[in-house]
Amino acid sequence: MPKQQRGEATVEQVLDAALRLYASSGEAGLTLGAITSASGVSSGSIYHHFGSLDGVVAALALGALEQLLKELMAALLQAADARSGIRAVVLAYLDFVQARPDAARLIHSVTADRLGMAHAREIRDTQEARLTPITLWIHAHQESGELAALSAPLIESLAMGPVVAVVRRWLTVGDVDLEEAARELPDHIWRSVGK
């Protein structure tokens, strides 16, 4: 097996073990000792591939974020107009959270937030291929007169901010009904971004 393939296999082995640990024990379960035991990979190899324990968490969170963005993009690009696009993105986000609560919890964790704040530009750059079509979609629907004439980051924030807040509350407090959110949020968000 070539060296690069062995390295990729090691990375996957560590990430698979770390995700299982996270699912069973939360962030507290993501210790170097637990990951080495669960993955069979040495701590030196983990440091070599990820730099630190935070690097493992960051890689997990980025992988989950990439999957979420992929699903949001697919939903958005299938929409016939801006209003149905907003609805599709909201519903896709909520569906992702319900189908993968551990990945959602990881994306919205304190650790992921801290790493996201420290490396926001770098993360945005790595996701540029996924984010550019969203920006182009926003501009196209602004030009057609369907979306408000606001900056793309502001449209994104108005569209996703309420969804993220509801998801965080569902993941932490548990007093939000995601079915109610799916019924109500798209129209309320549309009123803030549509024309």
Image: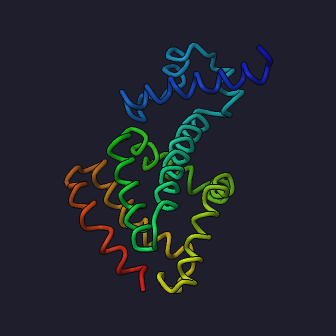
Classify residue 161 as left or right of residue 173: right
Classify residue 80 as left or right of residue 134: left
Q: Judge whether 40 appears above or below 160 on screen.
A: above
Location of residue 62 (image quadrant): top right
**Which of 118 and 59 lies nearest the eye of the viewer?**
59
**Which of 143 and 190 lies nearest the eye of the viewer?**
143
> Residue at horizontal 39%, vertical 47%?
96
> Residue at horizontal 49%, vertical 75%?
155
Residue lying at the far front of the rendered structure: 80
Counting from the top left corner in percent of width and height, residue 149 is at 53, 86
> Residue at horizontal 42%, vertical 31%?
22
**Which of 48 and 94 lies nearest the eye of the viewer?**
94
Counting from the top left corner in percent of width and height, residue 7 is at 72, 23
Counting from the top left corner in percent of width and height, residue 187 is at 30, 73
For the C terminus, which image quadrant? bottom left
For the N terminus, which image quadrant? top right
